[in-house]
Image (cartoon, grey):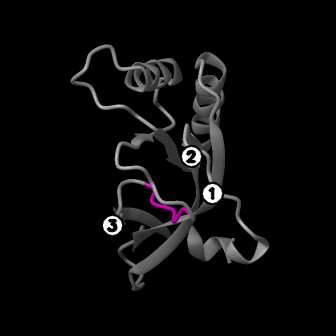
Amino acid sequence: MDAAIEQYAPTETHNDTPTVSLSLPYSIHPSCLHMQVRSGSKAKNLVQFAIRKLAPSDQNSTHIEQITWNAFGDGISKAIACAEMMKRRSTVDFYEYVQIGYKRIEQIWQPVNLDVELDTLKVNKDIPAICILLSKIPLPNLTAGEN
């Protein structure tokens, strides 16, 4: 089976949703700040930005009640680190909810050797994803049937 896979190479990746959108069982506050974390993101810069948004300095700034840290693939560990740094550095006590799931991407694989007559493959990959909700507003308790 491995020999057959080596005859193909991925050429295109179709991704309908560039961000992670997991369904949270809670309603999101309109002022929620959504932070998209990628593997190359600088955690320090992301956390500093979120803390500045959390404590507005003037009257014209919006008051943030909730923050979501979203990531998929290699960025998951960095999103967890950002959420933990946020909880540690902030003076606010947060309520936390974590949702894990998968993000589906579609790849088109073309044959490497054009001399052999092979079909093009369409490959669907499920990549792990996470959404961490940090809320100043108390979150309602979920019963076992609602998960």
Label 2 and label 3: CA atoms lie apart by 23 Å
Q: Nearer the viewer, mark 1 or mark 3?
A: 1
- Disc 1 or 3, which lies upstream in sequence? 3
The x and y percentages for residue 11 are: 36, 63
The residue segment tinted magenta is 20-24
| Residue in the foreground of this view, choosing between 70 and 1 | 70
Residue 21 in magenta stretch:
yes
144 over 60 or under it: above or below: below
Q: Are marks 2 and 1 in contact (CB under 8 Å)?
A: yes
Q: Which residue is mark 3?
A: 16
Image coordinates of residue 29 in percent, x first then y, are: 42, 50
The answer to whether residue 99 is above or below residue 89 is: below
What residue is at 58 percent from the left and 72 percent from the top?
A: 5
Task: Check the image and name the residue furthest to the left.
Answer: 60
Task: Give the Cα distance between marks 1 and 3.
Answer: 21 Å
Residue located 61% across and 17% down the image: 89
Q: Which mark is residue 99?
A: 1
Q: Position of residue 134 (x, y in %)?
A: 57, 40
Amino acid type, label 2: Leu
Task: Please tell me in which quadrant of the rendered image residue 53 appears.
Answer: top left
Please determine whether, in this image, residue 32 is positioned above or below residue 64. Answer: below
Mark 2: few/some/many CA within 10 Å (<14, 14-19, 20+): many
Give neighbour class at mark 1: few <14, some 14-19, many 20+ (Cα, 10 Å). some
**Image location (x, y in percent) of residue 130:** 59, 52
Q: Amino acid at mark 1?
A: Gln
Q: Nearer the viewer, mark 2 or mark 3?
A: 2
SS for dot 1: strand
Residue 28: numbered disc: none
